[in-house]
Image (cartoon, rainbow, N blue to C red):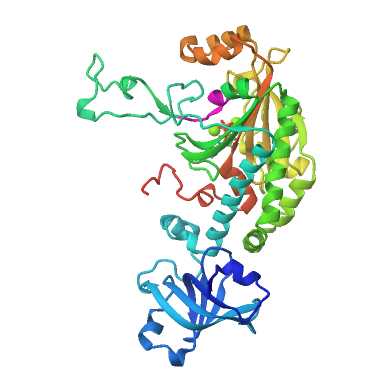
Amino acid sequence: MTEKNVAEILKTDTVLQEVHVKGWVRTFRSNRFIALNDGSTIKNIQCVIDFENTDENTLKRITTGAAIAVNGTVVESQGRGQTVEIQVSEIEILGDSNPDEYPIQPKKHSFEFLRENAHLRMRTNTFSAVMRVRSKLSFAVHKYFQENGFNYVNTPIITGSDAEGAGEMFRVTNFEDNKAPLTEDGKIDYSKDFFGKETNLTVSGQLEAETFAMSLGKAYTFGPTFRAENSNTTRHLAEFWMIEPEVAFMDLDGNMDLAEDFIKSVINDVLENCKDDLAFLDQRLTQEEKSKPQAQRSEMSLLEKLKFVVKNNFKRVSYTEAIDILRNSKPNKKKKFQFPITDWGADLQSEHERFLVEKHFKCPVILFDYPANIKAFYMRLNDDGKTVRAMDVLFPGIGEIVGGSQREERYDVLVEKMKALDIEEQELWWYLDLRKYGTAVHSGFGLGFERLVQFTTGMSNIRDVIPFPRTPQNAEF
Ligand code: ATP
Ligand code: MG
Ligand code: MG
Ligand code: MG
């Protein structure tokens, strides 16, 4: 008797083998048929019980959610949609699940309800599929960089630099309020919160990763980042994972090539390695689309979208060109896109971004050369003195998925820009050293991992692609 998981058994071409399987009961019908799932695949295996020879107490304890172990023989199945099933010879209840209390009943639950049960929602088909795809994508991210000569860097989570924070940072505090240092007017002095220093949770590992690019050549971080986003959109979390490559001697064109190649490669990887899960999510999304009014339905299925992205070039367009397009487009008042006309110099809203991607170009878009005043201080100023070598990759259904740039490598220009924004030189002395000693053209970007998972799984809310979403409403567990 060999212990096997469900995925292995379903792949098997040898019937009549004896197996031992453990998992959780999804459903139990007619005192005979258990749909068993162990998380190894979206599919359940049917376990058929010889109920006449199974004692009544055991039968009663086979309930949805219970953990069980079975011994049995793999046989061909007559059931629809399954090639094999297990003829059970022995069953053991490992952990009971009271059917009157178990929250995950075999019925359709709303995603809101499941978010409140984040510790159990992976026991549903949709969430188990999403989390397996997330896991595979994360492996694909490392695989891509490792195979292309990048070094994985762990940048700090607690950081003193707040140059990029723009008021979106969580403070790190290690004192109790009653022992807190006080300011002259008797208020708690939060600038001394971390052993006497001011510290925050990181909003990006970029600046630190740049130090590695300027020594190891190619580096990437892939870690948690935090933003005190007090917004409730379907694309923002207070805690999310960011993928940030930085490369020395690479300009903005190289950066765009890297972003495009990277995204295509990891999506291709999951198309290869998550076939069953993606087929399930494709079906689920198709059903969801059908419930929408015609004008709002997506023209492509999930799988078609993924294949489209992998096969077609992303459209590269300058910010200035994009503004012209937006100014000359008539937003469709009744339907999906309603946005104010935008002036040159304004940051684009996600409606603008989605209009360009979904209506105008009908493919992923890379916008570049943004106005300097809406982008961070470290981006390379163009000769026009007005724009910087920034790029955002925009995706259908999402808007911005990547933000990146060629970095300002000229010491004097960088110092000027910092002055203009009141950023103290002494705060970033170590960053400025990179420009003092052996500076070189270099570039990088940040890709929000959850937005990538959102696109790949077709989930519409970012809270449904991270195990335990952190939002203004939720940080309970
Ligand atoms: P947005 O315009 O959507 O708020 P941003 O321009 O503030 O994003 P960047 O600072 O450019 O974001 O960060 C790089 C990437 O990180 C973004 O392109 C996006 O994919 C992701 N990202 C940013 N903020 C969040 C967030 N709050 N939750 C999840 N992902 C995020
Ligand atoms: Mg933002
Ligand atoms: Mg943005
Ligand atoms: Mg951005």
Q: Position of residue 441 (x, y in %)?
A: 69, 18
Q: Name the foreground residue: 163 vs 69.
A: 69
Q: Is residue 433 left or right of residue 306?
A: left
Q: Is residue 401 left or right of residue 99?
A: right
Task: Determine whether 90 is above or below 335 in the image.
Answer: below
Q: Position of residue 196 (x, y in %)?
A: 31, 19
- Counting labels gives 0
Q: Name the foreground residue: 192 vs 75.
A: 75
What range of the chain is rendered magenta? Answer: 202-209
Instruction: Determine the image quadrant of residue 298.
Output: bottom right
Task: Determine whether 68 is above or below 471 in the image.
Answer: below
On the question of residue 230 being in view, the answer is: yes
Going 59% across and 9% down the picture, which residue do you hit? Answer: 436
Residue closest to the far bottom: 52
Going 44% across and 73% down the picture, which residue do you hit? Answer: 68
Going 48% across and 70% down the picture, which residue do you hit? Answer: 22
Q: Position of residue 300 (x, y in %)?
A: 73, 55
Residue closest to the far right: 312
Q: Position of residue 145 (x, y in %)?
A: 65, 37
Q: Is residue 150 left or right of residue 196?
A: right
Q: Name the foreground residue: 64 vs 392.
A: 64
